[in-house]
Image (cartoon, rainbow, N blue to C red):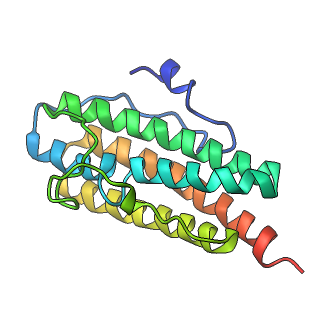
């Protein structure tokens, strides 16, 4: 996948402006592919984030158009991350089906991983927490994967997750803490 393909999902203002590294690996490695499966469609994963943010978007757009757009565009950025991870998993010799590995005991993804919530402030806090957990998982996998190409990609994805935390915190301040 080339940088040009990233443009379809990369949303200005909703992701870090720096380019993504080339999607490549040192060589096939099923263990690394399995680690990335958790980032792809595990409990704390891009697939979970996409699903949770789209669910929240359905309600947020009725409260405030910009807030709805925030969740929609962040979820589209997460789709790009999922696409990048799928390419890495394939290059490593894995199969990017919608399942985790260690976090799900190899089982397929389930909607139980989503935090649905019942009110905007609770949902935004859960979205912020999800981003922090994703960063923690990526950092753990950077330490576990001795492939500099994969590490560079994961570091770059973390930059987007940090943008999402900032944006979600701004929304939390505006809609939950304003007087």
Which image quadrant for residue 111? bottom left
Which residue corresponds to the image point at 30% horizontal and 46% vertical from the top-left? Answer: 151
In front of the other: 85 or 106: 106
Where's residue 21, x and y in %? 40, 33
Q: Is residue 64 above or below residue 19?
A: below
Instruction: Classify the position of the C terminus by image quarter.
Output: bottom right
Q: From the viewer's perspective, is 49 left or right of 177?
A: left
Q: From the viewer's perspective, is 65 left or right of 13?
A: right
Q: Is residue 132 above or below residue 110?
A: below
Which residue corresponds to the image point at 67% horizontal and 37% vertical from the top-left? Answer: 12
In front of the other: 57 or 73: 57
Where's residue 68, x and y in %? 72, 50
Where's residue 5, x and y in %? 49, 20
Instruction: Classify the position of the N terminus by image quarter.
Output: top left
Which residue corresponds to the image point at 33% horizontal and 61% vertical from the top-left? Answer: 137
Question: Which residue is the extreme one toward the right?
Answer: 179
In front of the other: 14 or 108: 108
Where's residue 125, x and y in %? 59, 72
Q: Is residue 127 above or below residue 26?
A: below
């Amino acid at each position: 996948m080339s940088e040009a393909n990233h443009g379809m999902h990369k949303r200005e203002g909703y992701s870090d402006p720096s380019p993504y590294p080339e999607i490549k690996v040192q060589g096939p490695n099923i263990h690394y592919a399995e680690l990335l499966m958790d980032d792809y469609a595990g409990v704390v994963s891009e697939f979970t984030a996409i699903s949770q943010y789209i669910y929240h978007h359905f309600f947020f757009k009725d409260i405030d158009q910009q807030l709805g757009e925030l969740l929609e565009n962040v979820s589209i950025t997460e789709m790009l991350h999922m696409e990048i991870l799928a390419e890495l998993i394939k290059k490593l010799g894995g199969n990017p089906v919608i399942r985790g590995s260690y976090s799900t005991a190899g089982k397929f993804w389930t909607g139980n991983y989503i935090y649905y919530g019942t009110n905007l402030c609770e949902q935004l806090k859960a979205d912020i927490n999800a981003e922090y957990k994703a960063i923690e998982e990526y950092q753990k996998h950077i330490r576990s994967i001795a492939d500099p190409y994969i590490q560079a990609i994961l570091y770059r994805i973390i930059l987007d997750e940090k943008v999402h935390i900032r944006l979600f915190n701004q929304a939390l301040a505006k809609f939950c803490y304003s007087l």
